[in-house]
């Protein structure tokens, strides 16, 4: 009446497959979080540069101050800003934690100014 042929091998195999799925899911979530942060940094830099370009005639302090405000409003932090003629060059960063204990920073740059042509 005893089941001497079964030793739990299928259970161990099922647990291993389940762990593999969890690891793949965590990796996918980490990659997705990093890509989202990169996109958020691009948006913050683009909008910051556009806002700064609107203030370019008032000088670099006004343009970069406005760029910093808009960059922060879009979830980023202004790393660098400079005025090149009427063009504003902005670099923004966004902090991301794709996995617990793993903090990274995504950065992006943008340039905005008047249309030439």
Image: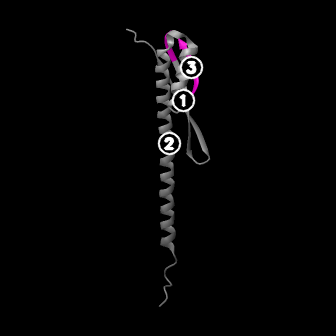
Q: Earlier in the sequence, mark 2 or mark 1?
A: 2
Q: Earlier in the sequence, mark 3 or mark 1?
A: 3
- Labelled disc at residue 65: 3
- Separation of marks 3 and 1 at Cα, in angstroms: 11 Å
- Separation of marks 2 and 3 at Cα, in angstroms: 29 Å
When asked about the image quadrant of residue 98, the answer is top right
Task: Provide residue 16's location: percent of width, then percent of height.
Answer: 51, 63
Q: Which residue is mark 1?
A: 72
Task: Provide residue 56's location: percent of width, then percent of height.
Answer: 50, 12
Q: Which residue is mark 2?
A: 33
Question: Which circle, 2 or 3, is nearer the viewer?
Answer: 3
Q: Label 3: few (<14), some or many (≥20) within 10 Å?
A: some
Give the residues drawn in magenta, as a range. Answer: 77-88
In the image, residue 84 lies in the stretch drawn in magenta: yes
2 and 3 marks in contact (CB < 8 Å): no
3 and 1 marks in contact (CB < 8 Å): no
Q: Label 1: few (<14), some or many (≥20) within 10 Å?
A: some
Task: Provide residue 94's location: percent of width, then percent of height.
Answer: 55, 34
In the image, residue 114 lies in the stretch drawn in magenta: no
């Amino acid at each position: 009446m005893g089941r001497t042929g079964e030793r739990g091998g299928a259970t161990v195999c099922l647990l291993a497959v389940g762990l593999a799925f969890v690891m793949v899911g965590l990796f996918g979530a980490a990659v997705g979080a990093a890509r989202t942060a990169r996109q958020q940094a691009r948006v913050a830099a683009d909008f910051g540069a556009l806002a700064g370009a609107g203030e370019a005639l008032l000088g670099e302090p006004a343009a970069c101050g406005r760029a910093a405000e808009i960059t922060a409003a879009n979830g980023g932090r202004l790393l660098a800003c400079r005025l090149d003629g009427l063009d504003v060059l902005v670099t923004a960063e966004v902090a991301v934690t794709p996995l617990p204990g793993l903090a990274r920073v995504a950065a992006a740059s943008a340039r905005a100014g008047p249309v030439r042509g």
